[in-house]
Image (spheres, rainbow, N blue to C red):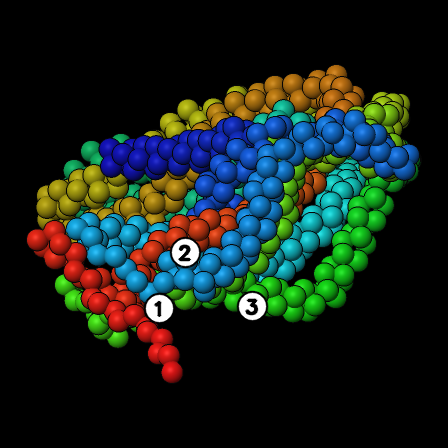
Amino acid sequence: MGLCENIRGWRWQGSAGAFRATLGVLMLGLSVAQSVPPQTVCPAAAAPHSLTQPHYQDTANSTVGFMSALVQSFLNTVQPNPFPKDLILRIVKELEQQQLDQEIHKEALVYQVGFLVCAAIGVLYIVLMPIVGFFLACCRCCGNCGGKMYQKQTPSIHCRRRTLYWTAFVTTVIILAGNICMFKSNEAIKGSVDQSKVELDKTIDNISSFLTAVPQQIDHVVHESYRTIQEVTRNLDAIGPQLGAEIKERFRRTLDPALLSVRLLDQETVNTSLQLSKLNTSLTQLQSTTDRLQANVTAVKNRINQTLSNPNCAGCNMLQPELQKLTLDTSITIPSLNEFQSAVDEVNKADLKSKIKEVEGYFDSIPQTVTNETKDVVQSSKQQLGDIKTQISQVTNDIPLSALTNVSDTLGQLQREINKITPEAERVEHIRWAVCLALCLVVLLVVVCNLMGLVLGPVGLAPKADPTKRSCTADCGGTFLMMGAGFSFLFSWLFMIVVLLLFLLGGNIYTLLCRPWSNGELLKFIDTPGLIPGLEIGPSLGLKSNINISDIYRDCEANQPLWTTLRLYELVNLDDVLNVSKYTEEIRERFENTDITLSTITLLSPEVKNQLKSFSDTTANFDSTAVTQQINNVSSINLNTTADKLDELATLQKNADTKNELQKEAMNLRLIQADIETTFIPQLENVNLTIQSLVASAEKINGTVGEVLSNVGAAQDFLNTNTTQIVKTESRKFLDCQLGYFTVYADWANLTITQQVGRCGPVAGAVDSAEIILCSHIVESLNAFWFSLGWCMIFFIPSIIFSIKLAKYYRRMKYSDVYDSSDHLVMNHIPRAQMKYP
């Protein structure tokens, strides 16, 4: 019995533990499911595609020429006056009237006094140099001005020769330096002109890319509004799945615990029904075994009774009381089992699974209900979205993009003109380069002559030699020096004409164009009203105020957008264009006036609730104490005790037959006991375990029913009181989400148009590139060339003087003059010519 009780207890604890573990897992899953936030009905609006800025080519960088500082310093000295804005305006005005006031002439001459002084010096050089050269040549031909091939020998002759040599050498080196600068500046001009075509093409391409990108960027902003409208339209078309799913989610937070408890109760009811079926089967089987064993025990009892009644049986009367106990006539009865079975059957008839499916079907029908109830408002909202699309598209008409098209056409025409004149410009530039190279070579010829004279003269000179006997090498040196002086006289005045013309051209371009361009005065001058007819950017764009070129350049230099640069806010009320509130308010009002009515549902009818209460009461009254006592009574039967007493009685018998009969019946009892232990007892234990499982199920069902009634009641109250409010709240959230897309777009579009569209850095870059090409490259190289050439021409004067004087120390004289160290000058006697008379 103890073993049977241990087995029963272990199985009960195992079943209860498994049930508690299962229930714990289910509740944990429910809590986790409730803790996970539901998928929001309003996902974050997709970020609009960022505005792509066009890729621009790198243009020329501003570089400082090798002589820029020196030339600019000279020009600033020549023209220290500021940019003559007022003077130019007066001249332009007088030219329009086709008359010039003498006062303006005087003022212009005063302003250009520095250039006039330099021009006067140049003219004086041009006039005097050939005259002086001519008279010097005539004078020398007459034997004067050093033309007589005679050199007086004095004590300081060597000192004077060395002094003249080094001064001529230094002068030649200075001329050579200027000549090198001429070569370099000439190549710089050529490189600048050759590169200017490429740089102009890059600049025009950048401007064209900019002008092409602005309409594309505007279209991109408008297209993003189409994407937003399409997104909202898709959401409105899917209002059933989206809004309905959110309403379902709100309901499920309260209803899922109720449905879970109903599922648990249904499962427990099914398990209980199975256990009852198993118990009935076990009881039937147990009763069949009991009847069979009882028949066997009765047969043995009758035979033993006959043996004990035999007169030959000695002392058999003492065993009669024990024989009366020998019976198995008992049965296992459960008083409340029928009531319990009836209660379970009633719950099964209620079909809780169908109730669960009915509720879930109600939930699943919510999206379709939402779709049907909002069909009209969705259609009207789509029409409002079309009006929003039309309003936003208006921005492309309000912004004057046609002006950009006109500029693009002008740039295209300019590009074609540049390509047309490029071959001719290249040909002219090649001629200019060749002419300038010839000028450089002529100056180099003078330098070479001087250097040859400075090299050959000292090499072939013997200081103590007779001047009439100087070597050919020294004489060639002197001749080269005279050739250098002759070339200088011959070409210097012609070169000075070139210097003068280029000085007036390049110098005035620098002072009147490049310098004010660099410091911003030129753009401010262009902004002068009436200076350039038709240059009124503001009115041409339809603005209320005019826009200055300098302001545009300043903004574009900072890479500002066209919205602020061209003051498009005066032309387009962007806030009004992007303000779609008048449409969204209509959509909101229609949604507010739309009622989404969900049908009512009863989770559990009153009849089912009464059945569950009755079921709970029945399970509470289910008692297994009497059954347990019956099982214990049956289990206590032990036929081996009676068999042992029969064996003891058999040993007392003298009659062999009686003894054998008693022993035989004792053996039969032991066989029946063995059958009881191997068949009847396991069946009895099975019945006991089933009953204990039913008891445990009854206890759990009692608690589950209470939980079901509590949860279902709370869920039913929640549905009855909150359904309408939940529908309105979720509908409002859904609408706010859709309208929020427009708010996100409007903020992005406002930011993009006012801060990103048409960043005009390429415009300022084009202006800077033009300045670099014209001023930093071409004009600076041109000024460096005439400055270098003028430098050489100025130093031609001392070069001529020193070369002519130094040449006499190296050339072979016709008349000798010997200096004696005893301070006596010895003259060679030259016989006088004598006339003979006939």
Q: Residue at x 60, y 64 (%)?
A: 432
Can you tell which quarter of the image residue 379 is in? Answer: top right
Residue at the disc numbered 2: 145
The furthest residue to the left: 822
Q: CA distance from mark 1 to mark 2?
A: 16 Å
Label 2 neighbour load within 10 Å: few <14, some 14-19, many 20+: some
Q: Amino acid at mark 3?
A: Ala
> What's the residue type where badge 2 is placed?
Cys
| Mark 2 residue element | loop
Residue at image point 34% right, 45% down: 682
Between tags 2 and 3, which lies in front? 2
In primary-sequence order, the first of circles 1 and 2 is 2
Judge left or right: residue 104 versus residue 423.
Answer: right
559 or 724, nearer to the observer: 559
Badge 2 vs badge 3, beta-carbon distance below 8 Å? no
Residue in the foreground of this view, choosing between 464 and 388:
464
Q: Which mark is residue 479?
A: 1
Where residue 414 sits in the image (x, y, percent)? 76, 56
Q: Is residue 156 left or right of residue 792?
A: left
- Image quadrant in which you'd find residue 483: bottom left
Residue at 68% from the left image edge and 53% from the top image edge: 204
Q: Which mark is residue 434?
A: 3
Contact? badges 1 and 2 (CB < 8 Å): no
Tell which of 531 and 535 is nearer to you: 531
| Front tag of 1 and 2 | 2
Q: Report, in whole angstroms, how far the alpha carbon at label 1 lies from the one at label 3.
A: 29 Å
